[in-house]
Image (tube, helix red, strand yellow):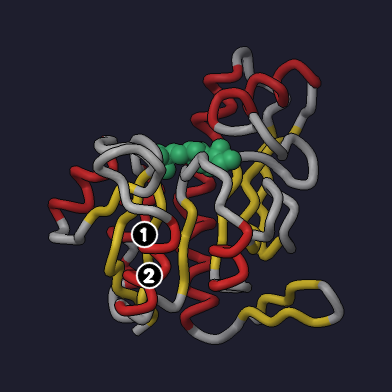
Amino acid sequence: MLALAVFVSGRGSNLRAVLDSPALKNLIRVNAVVGDKLYCPAFDIAKNFSIPVYSVGKKDGFISFDDLEVILKDFKIDLIVLAGFLKLIPDNFVRAFRNKIINIHPALLPSFGGSGMYGMNVHKAVFESSAQVSGASVHFVDETYDTGRIIAQRCVDISDIKSPEEIAERVLSIEHHLLPYVIEKIALGKVFVENNRVRVET
Ligand code: GAR
């Protein structure tokens, strides 16, 4: 079983997609949910599944990334999944879990990524660019926003949409399939990094 920690900041629909995925049922176990707030709706999902939650940050009531590293290592976490987690992960934490942190981004990277490009900001930028396709990307996390190696992407036609909200809706339904798919491939040992490219075995 692959031991997962899922990092969240808000609603947690991707967390739910992972927890509800029939394909992942016998392959993974979510041992911790981590947020950058003291409360967000995703914590309720975690609690319904009896998964411990942690709030990471610098203020009172939060644990530091250094303490979180110790906790996740105690849990023998194999994979950290950023599922709507909006804070930058500190460099030493990335180094401690090199190639063991993945992120889902609601656009086709390397376009529409980087600092400030999260949630509706992404879909507004896509809408304003008049792009005719959008999609979702899952990538390894490195020291900067959205620049790590891309593992898998799916695109969706948005040539008929009338608002950024419609793009968000279409992309989100793709995310809910793409993220469990990538986690399944990692759990099955079918994701390889070769010559700076990621290969996913079918
Ligand atoms: C998702 O659309 C995810 O791709 C996005 O936040 C949303 C979280 O939704 N992440 C980013 O924008 C990261 N740059 P959820 O809480 O319902 O899973």
Sequence-wise, the earlier of marks 1 and 2 is 2
Q: Secondary structure at mark 1?
A: helix
Residue that mark 2 sits on: 4
Q: CA distance from mark 1 to mark 2?
A: 10 Å
Q: Do we see residue 193 in this rendering?
A: yes
State whether residue 46 is above or below residue 72: above
Q: Residue at x 28, y 39 (%)?
A: 60
- The quarter of the rendered structure image containing the C terminus is bottom right
Front residue (pair 127, 96): 96
Q: Which residue is mark 1?
A: 18
Q: Position of residue 185 (x, y in %)?
A: 54, 76
Residue visible at 80% across and 82% down in the picture: 194
Quadrant location of residue 103? bottom right
Name the image quarter holding residue 92.
bottom right
Say few, some or many: other residues with alpha carbon within 10 Å of mark 2 (under 14 / 14 to 19 / 20 or more).
many
Identity, as a three-letter code, of the amino acid under mark 2:
Leu
The mark found on residue 126 in the picture is: none
Which one is in front, 138 or 80? 80
Q: Is mark 2 within 8 Å of ligand 1?
A: no
The reply, left or right, for residue 24 in relation to residue 135 is: left
Residue drawn at x 44%, y 78% is 78
